[in-house]
Image: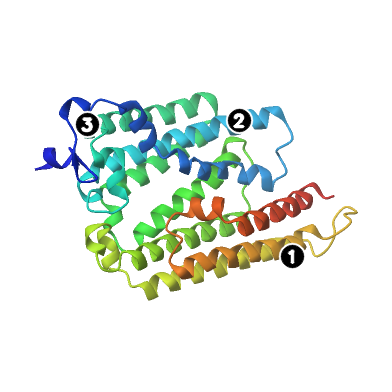
Amino acid sequence: MAERGSLLLDGRTRRPESLGTGTAWGVLKTSRPRQWVKNVLVVAAPAAAGRLGSWHTAGQLLLVFLLFTAAASAVYLVNDARDAEADRAHPVKRHRPVAAGHVPVPLAYGVGGLLAASVPVTALVVCNAMTSALLTAYLTMQFAYCLRLKHVLVVDLAVVTSGFLMRAMVGGVALSIPLSRWFLITAGFGALFMVSAKRYSEAVQMADRKGATRALLSEYTTGYLRFVWQLAAGVAVLGYCLWALESGGTANGSLLPWRQLSMIAFILAVLRYAVFADRGTAGAPEDVVLRDRPLAVIGLVWMAMYGLAVADL
């Protein structure tokens, strides 16, 4: 039955001899290139510390970006291999290469396992032991999520959130930059905001067939998920504002209090994203961030203000 299901795509039967066509592309697609943008978070800690002004830093961050991309790709490959049967019941996920039969399940497991084994070793050689340990912790938690934790209420939200937080931390760890409490609070709850908004959107969109796509959605209510993303958004805003107000005013002769002014753009960005969360259309955070022009403009304004604050201009 599973073999027959792997030969079906969009209701059409694929010839067995065509199964090997495009396998390499299928493996690449399974690694989610569109979601690699999430790994840009590796620059968050160095940017917050004003440590982006050297070629050495840029080179290290590029390496960290590639390592985290490889680690995340390993998780996606293993996850899709394990969930291939369930994904075939999803109107969108059934088009994923593994579920559609373009990438054999054993190959997805093999490539994912190879990447997972090589990432911590490479990090130990090109970065430091703490970076290797953080990437190992990320892989361990994410594989545990694929195998079991995705079925544990609330813990699934915590594990996915921790993946984003680790992305935000790893750049600082690789460059031995101390991570402030406000940075960790804002990054952590900002990640929980986006993760719970995504779950809320999935629950709204799949209300009549939750059990067939993500079993744990049947255990959550939309009211609870709405409460989680609203709570997380509030804490993230509070954490950021406490950081911004910590200096009290202009610093080192700055023309304007950029740290305090950046609160406006940050809050507007959260409010804008909350529009999509409230509509139940934040199921793909990368699409919301990249395709919504007002949100992109607000984000650019925030980045400019934040940069001016860090540079004390």
Amino acid under disc 3 = Pro
Amino acid under disc 2 = Gln
User: Which residue lies under the disc numbered 3?
Assistant: 106
- Cα separation, mark 1 vs mark 3, equals 53 Å
User: Which residue lies under the disc numbered 2?
Assistant: 60
Q: Which one is nearer the viewer's eye here, 153 or 87?
A: 87
Mark 1 vs 3, N-terminal side: 3
Mark 2 vs 3, N-terminal side: 2
Residue at position x 77%, y 53% in the image: 309
Secondary structure under tag 2 reads helix
Tell whether label 2 touches label 1 (CB within 8 Å): no
Q: Foreground mark, 1 or 3?
A: 3
List x then y, in percent, for residue 150: 30, 54
Secondary structure under tag 3 reads helix
Q: Foreground mark, 2 or 3?
A: 3
Q: Residue furthest front?
A: 12
Please tell me how crowded label 1 is: few (under 14), some (14-19), or many (20+) other residues with Cα within 10 Å: some
List x then y, in percent, for residue 194: 48, 59
Q: Which one is nearer the viewer's eye here, 40 or 88?
A: 88
User: Which residue lies under the disc numbered 1?
Assistant: 245
- Cα separation, mark 1 vs mark 2, equals 31 Å
Q: Quadrant of residue 51?
A: top right
Tell whether label 3 touches label 2 (CB within 8 Å): no
Residue at position x 65%, y 42% in the image: 46
List x then y, in percent, for residue 32: 41, 40
Tell whether label 3 touches label 1 (CB within 8 Å): no
Residue 73 vs residue 212: left or right? right
Secondary structure under tag 1 reads helix
Amino acid under disc 1 = Leu
Please tell me how crowded label 2 is: few (under 14), some (14-19), or many (20+) other residues with Cα within 10 Å: some
